[in-house]
Image (cartoon, grey):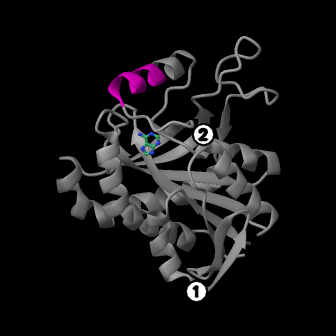
Amino acid sequence: MTTAILSAFAQEQTGLIELLERPERVQRAGRYFWRGHLQGQPVVLALSKLGKVAAATTATTVIEAFGAKQLVFTGVAGGVGPGVQVGDVVLATDFVQHDMDCSPLFPRYEIPLYGQSRFACDAALNAHLLIAAQQALVGLGADFDAQLHADLPRVHQGLIASGDRFVSSATEVAALVQGLTQAGHPPLAVEMEGAAVAQVCHDYGVPFAAVRTISDRADDSAHVDFNAFVRDTASRYAVGIVLGFLDGIPTA
Ligand code: ADE
């Protein structure tokens, strides 16, 4: 059973490609996909690119063309929930699109014609990802806690908000969190792809899970923190979590 591992940036994917057994690079839909095995499991590695539409294309292609039966997204996100700090990990329970607003035709944040605002992640995949993320943080936390923040990195579980915007100011993030919270959707983190992949997986009935390492606080210094984090740290987190996850799931 093929598992698709999606990443937003090449830096997050490189470490996994290096470990791929019997790697095969395939071009499709203007992207490169890497087929092979990791920890004995058949996988396809793919870059989502940035934003919801690009991510939806990648998700659809791994399902339709590569036969992926489950999808896992690893990447970075801006921490917006209380206590969600740089270096922490957020395991998504579900996703909302913070830039979806078809009001007054539909309630703000509701996906038109789906009758829902949130798409849930798969509970069984999440159980494996949680263990993998916790184990990865034990291994990596000692290296990173001094650089990133005073506390040991933590795994949080909750709602992630996606939208086609890199959130990079204190005013912007405050308005975004306030709007979502007032509508009953308080987010822990923001990024730009997860909700799109969750919706595609919902459409196909394919289990989906996502884990995001916090690279910034979506505030005025977000772009500085983000670039340094993706370059220095994100790839190590992604490799640790994905390998642990694949070790934990049953072989089919
Ligand atoms: N991914 C990582 N940081 C982000 C931010 N601040 N806004 C949107 N996506 C992100």
Residue pictured at 82% horizontal, 28% vertical: 113
Horizontally, residue 45 falls left or right of residue 17, namely right
The residue carrying mark 1 is 21
Residue 151: give x, y in percent of width and height.
Answer: 22, 47
The residue carrying mark 2 is 94
Could you tell me which secondary element the residue under label 1 belongs to? Answer: strand
User: Furthest residue to the bottom?
Assistant: 22
Quadrant observed for ligand 1 in the rendered image = top left
Q: Disc 1 or 2, which lies upstream in sequence?
A: 1
Magenta region includes residue 176: yes
Q: Is mark 1 within 8 Å of ligand 1?
A: no
Magenta region: 169-177
Compared to residue 78, the image places residue 61 above or below, namely below
As rendered, which of 249 and 140 lies closer to the eye?
140
Disc 1 to disc 2, C-alpha distance: 32 Å
Q: Residues within 10 Å of mark 2 (few under 14, many from 20)?
A: many
